[in-house]
Image (spheres, rainbow, N blue to C red):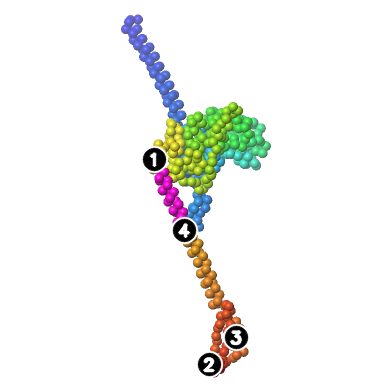
Amino acid sequence: MSDIEKNELLENVENAENANVESVDEASEQALQDTQDKKDDIILEVDDLQKHFVLSRTLLGKPTSTLKAVDHVSFKLKRGTTIGIVGESGCGKTTMGRTILKLYDIDGGKVYYNGEDITNISKKKMRSLRTSMQLIFQDPYSSLPPRMTIGSIISEAVKVHKIVPKEEVSSYVRDIMKKCGLQEQYYDRYPHEFSGGQRQRICIARALAVKPDLVICDEPVSALDVSVQAQIINLLKELQQTMNLTYVFISHDLSVVKYITDEIMVMYLGNMMEKGETDELFDNPLHPYTKALFSAVPVPDPDVKNKRIILEGDIPSPANPPKGCKFHTRCSQCMNVCKIIEPKYHEVTPGHFVACHLYDEDIMSRQEELDRAYEHVKEMEERQKEIADEYDVVKKIKDAFEKILKKKKADDVTVEESAPVATDEIKEEIGGENDFNGTDIIQNQEVTHTLEDGNVQGASDVNDEEER
């Protein structure tokens, strides 16, 4: 072999090696890109979501009192992750979950699922999405129909949505039961034959039977004891890994939320107070409400004493929330600006959002100006209250006069319409065609008497003689 041929052979080998290296590098880059795309894939986006309930209406149907259960809530959820929704009872967690699934009508804002706007989607199209979006109910006792067997409960949605062929339904349901820790012999049993933990497993199996991508867990372990809670939480995490599920986990148990979630959103009276990654939020809570909420989490160490923050002040009514920040009536760091201006969301650190004036540089730099504005607003409110009180007094006086006038008119009508007493009898006794009829009113009684012309003339003559 000549030197030229050897050189060509070496060049070909080097080119092949370089091509292999380039292909490996491209494959690695593509895998990394796919992983990043999968991580950044947004399955659910909630934009300024609102849900209001009308408490009272006028005769014409105009709302006079409205409860804002969910008020301007926004967040994004990545595929395969879990976001935890925490807050006190009555803050709107469950209502938000049901509104996202369109079990309640949306009163404002937008909901996007896999990039598609489902806010005003028709019922027919929404029905086709029901298999992708499922709900695990809070109470495992009342959410299972007592007259149906476990197999019938789990297979009902499978048959309706035609998840598998009809002849494969039984084996498919038994496989789902096995994944959820339920034995095959439970297929023909009824819900009352199971414990609380087993019933919750049945609810999970029913939700997963239609192969969903998004599952909203509405306090799935709140009705269970601690040991069973751990089993259900571990089951949910295992199913998430095997089936690539995405969870919206609603709970008030912060220790459970810390264990299962990737992000946490804190709600108060329908508003989002703070949102961030789980570890970041527990290590560095910013909002005063979040600090008070997390201070109530027990620490499993007898030597560590947690500094508990006790909230004081009145709990406002959700039907009549205070102006400005809804938490200012219970906040120990409340400023005057909190009472008149609603705080905006600020990204303090990457991915960590908080709605509090303490982290708004513009607000904090204008404290004196805002204090004067608050005093002015307070004076205006006091003046309006005085005007309202004066109006109430005038209205009461006017109502009293109207009552007196109505009563007087009623008395006059009664006097005019009352009949004469014994007029016909007196006429018969006295007689005469040229009788004179006179009427006297004595103590609101009518007395009618008849005097003859001659008697009247005689009476006048007697009076003339006495005067002489």
Give the residues in magenta.
370-388
Q: Disc 1 vs disc 2: which is toward the camera?
A: 2
Q: Disc 4 vs disc 2: which is toward the camera?
A: 2
- Determine crowd level at label 4: few under 14, some 14-19, many 20+ residues with C-alpha closer than 10 A: few
User: What secondary structure is marked by label 2?
Assistant: helix
First in sequence: mark 3 vs mark 2: 3
User: What secondary structure is marked by label 1?
Assistant: loop
- Closer to the camera, 236 or 91? 91
What kind of residue is marked 2?
Glu
Tell me the residue that label 3 is attached to: 424
Marks 1 and 2: CB-CB under 8 Å? Answer: no
Q: Main secondary structure of the magenta part?
A: helix
Q: Which residue in the rendered view is the most extreme toward the right?
A: 193
- Closer to the camera, 338 or 121? 338
Tell me the residue that label 4 is attached to: 390
- Closer to the camera, 353 or 382? 382
206 falls in the magenta region: no
Q: Estimate the x, y position of residue 18 in percent, counting from the top left.
A: 38, 15
Tell me the residue that label 1 is attached to: 366
> Which residue is at 44% across, 29% downward?
37
Q: Is residue 46 above or below residue 230?
A: below
Could you say which quadrant of the image residue 171 lies in?
top right
Tell me the residue that label 2 is attached to: 467
What kind of residue is marked 4?
Glu
> Which residue is at 35% across, 11% downward?
11
> Which residue is at 41% across, 20% downward?
25
Distance from the alpha carbon under mark 1 to that under mark 4: 36 Å
Q: Estimate the x, y position of residue 17 in percent, counting from the top left.
A: 39, 14
Distance from the alpha carbon under mark 4 to that under mark 2: 65 Å
